[in-house]
Image (spheres, helix red, strand yellow):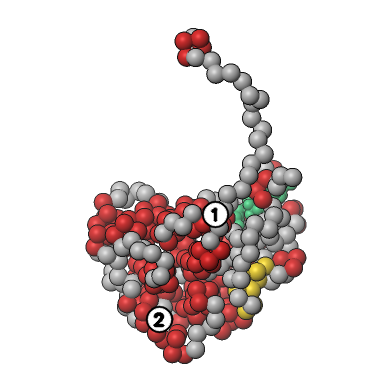
Amino acid sequence: MSAGAGLAGVVAGETAISTVEADGRGLRYRGYAIEDLAAHARFEEVAFLLLYGELPDRRALADFEARTARLRAPPAAVTAILDALPGGVHPMDALRSAVSVLGAVEPERGFEGQEAVAERLLAVLPALLLHWYTRIDTGIAPRSAADGAGLAEAFLRMLHGRTPPPTHRRALEVSLILYAEHEFNASTFAARVTASTRADLHSCITTAIGTLRGPLHGGANEAAMAFLDPLADPDAAEAAVLDALRAHRRVMGFGHRVYRGEDPRSALIKPWSRRLAAEARDERLFAVSERVEAVMRREKGLFPNLDFYSASLYRFLGIPTALYTPLFACARMAGWAAHVIEQRRVGRLIRPLARYTGPAPRPYVPLEARG
Ligand code: COA
């Protein structure tokens, strides 16, 4: 029997890292509900939980935070190559290239030190991204790797050159927690396929970044913003959604393979978008987003996924649209690494079969005879 297109509904392996609960009603990381993690945990606690299987105690968390803060500065050999990339490249291309080069500059030598390599990647990814972005895209000098701060604060400090207000830090932290892990999503599964060949961690993460880039996966947050940006008010939003649906175009940030009802992550990120909209005295973007949501529900019975309200939230945080998807990658790095480590323990090559639908056997015709 062959699996349907897109492997929908196929159980393709086992994992102890996270699970979508029955009927898509919830999501848990190693048994902990995302609602609890989003309400109480720091991103670094969640990253530790994903990588090592248990929540850290105070001491383990402090050590982890100190280690990752120390590991944030990118090597000169990699930044030199980033500096040589042309200005117009997409930040996902820059990030993918940076991880690939890092794998050549700091190769993983055997799997014994895999957790240390994972920590290095988790720490350095945002610094690589922002080194490239602030230097090439804005022409300003790269900012220091913001020693001593967790990922959310470090990211905003490197981007804006100042310490973020506490609500901004926490809003980004919640978003990073929700982006950190999601079972056998496309990029994680791709990383596991690469890991199953016993390739190095950098190769697995390069695979994952390439897979995350597309608009049906991580690229949806950026595509959602591109849709929302030109909409002047809720009525314009309603018309634009109806137009898109009439033309059979997808509205990015809606629908999900495993959540046919509400995406539990969307319910956690939307209030942050609302709160920051109020703080920013925004009168357009949040209202427009809510109308898009209402029309999609009414017309198609589709609900927003995590990417939809992340788009407006990131705008309120002053994050440029081109950085939305690479920022998702910086958070998902924790889940990717946990899955690579788990797949290495499984130790078996992932190599399924295909049902052949091509031509029946036929004789080779020599070039001269083909004219
Ligand atoms: N806008 C409009 N229609 C959509 C839609 C969207 N965002 N998502 C799904 N649909 C429609 C499909 O056209 C299809 O309708 P049909 O049966 O009339 O043809 C139906 O809903 C089922 O969609 P399908 O493509 O079979 O679902 P899937 O499980 O293969 O795809 C996604 C899941 C996520 C790829 C899909 O919902 C999508 O493209 N969403 C937009 C991209 C996005 O936000 N990705 C981020 C996911 S976290």
Q: In front: mark 1 or mark 2?
A: 1
In-front residue for pair 225/98: 98
In-front residue for pair 351/93: 351
Q: Which numbered disc covers residue 65?
A: 2
Q: Is residue 198 visible?
A: yes
The residue positioned 40% from the left and 81% from the top of the image is 65
In-front residue for pair 267/26: 26
The residue positioned 75% from the left and 65% from the top of the image is 23
- Which residue is label 1 attached to? 349
Type of amino acid under label 2: Glu
SS for dot 2: helix
Residue 221 at x, y percent in the picture: 54, 58
The residue positioned 50% from the left and 67% from the top of the image is 341
Residue 232 at x, y percent in the picture: 56, 56
The residue positioned 50% from the left and 85% from the top of the image is 56
State which quarter of the image contains the N terminus: top right
SS for dot 1: loop
Q: Is residue 313 visible?
A: no
Q: Which numbered disc covers residue 114?
A: none
